[in-house]
Image: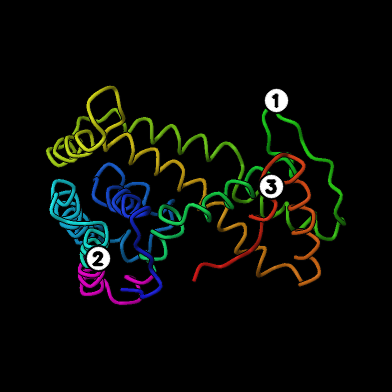
Amino acid sequence: MNQAISVTLSNAGRWEEAFMVLSIERCEPFFAEMGLPPEVVANTQPLLLCARNFLNRSLALRSADSLDTQEYVETVRGYLHDAFDQIAEDYGQATADELALWCMRYVVDQAFAVKLDIWVHLFRRLCGLITDDELSIEPTIDQSVLTPTCEIVRRYLQPDPIKEARRRIEEAGRLPKSEWEEELDKSVRYSAGEGDIAGAVEIALTLVENIVYQHRAFRVLSELQNSLTEDETTALLDWARQQASMLGMRGDAVDFRPLP
């Protein structure tokens, strides 16, 4: 397992959410759009079984009253180590490492997800990809930066493909629940208490929708990083941070920071 992966009391549940998505068959048609490694997209069954094994072990810990906080975290870390070792055996170490970073990027590392959401908001306004009730942003950056930026942004953030993905996700949500989904749903509902709450399938499909969108934003940032000069990148960052602050967002969260 990639040694840079962090497991803490606060993010252990998010690791479970990542593996929840990977364990549910109705999520599989979206794996490519979510940016999962192509080796996984081509053969999902080994990952599905591995994810279910991790969840069976991890969710069982919730009723283990004898574990203190540190023991719980260390146990979950051990389960993750076992899971990624199995993924490496099934797909190769490079794919296992890539999948671990995928989990961190889109589910576990909330700060990175916030950054992607801010960039999406700014890019859509900058490049005119907005709805009737939204305001565009008057560009205050040089045309030499604006033109290549919006060419890349429009390639990935056009509203119609995103709307179509949402339609398909909603359609997937109407499918009958499988035996695994029923069992997983009970575990998740039980952990959150009784009442009107979202179950496993609802949580997983919400994540799928978010990740499909965020992966598009990630591809925009990746291409911009490779296309813009250092001065152009600096100009874009300065503009984005200023705009984010003006809109009440975290300007300090806007950067091209790569994941470890």
Instruction: Judge by depth and name the residue closer to the eye, 218 or 101.
Output: 101
| Numbered disc 2: secondary structure | helix
Q: Position of residue 188 (x, y in %)?
A: 23, 38
For the residue marked with disc 2, what is the amino acid?
Glu
For the residue marked with disc 1, what is the amino acid?
Asp
Q: CA distance from mark 2 to mark 1?
A: 50 Å
Q: Position of residue 63 (x, y in %)?
A: 14, 46
Stretch of the chain drawn in magenta: 80-97
Give the main secondary structure of the magenta stretch.
Answer: helix
**N-terminal-most mark, 3 or 1:** 3
Residue 68 against residue 95 in the figure, above or below = above
Q: Residue at x 66, y 67 (%)?
A: 225
Q: Residue at x 49, y 71 (%)?
A: 260
Instruction: Judge by depth and name the residue closer to the eye, 93 or 254.
Output: 254
* Residue on which disc 3 sits: 123
For this view, does 158 lie left or right of residue 246? left
* Residue on which disc 2 sits: 74
Q: CA distance from mark 2 to mark 3?
A: 40 Å
Residue 233 against residue 160 in the figure, above or below = below
| Numbered disc 3: secondary structure | helix
Q: Position of residue 160 (x, y in %)?
A: 57, 36
| Numbered disc 1: secondary structure | loop
Few, some or many C-alpha atoms within 10 Å of disc 3 (few <14, some 14-19, many ≥20)? many
Instruction: Judge by depth and name the residue closer to the eye, 82 or 222.
Output: 82
For the residue marked with disc 3, what is the amino acid?
Phe
Q: Quadrant of residue 79?
A: bottom left
Q: CA distance from mark 3 to mark 1?
A: 16 Å
Disc marking residue 132: 1
Q: Residue at x 40, y 43 (%)?
A: 207
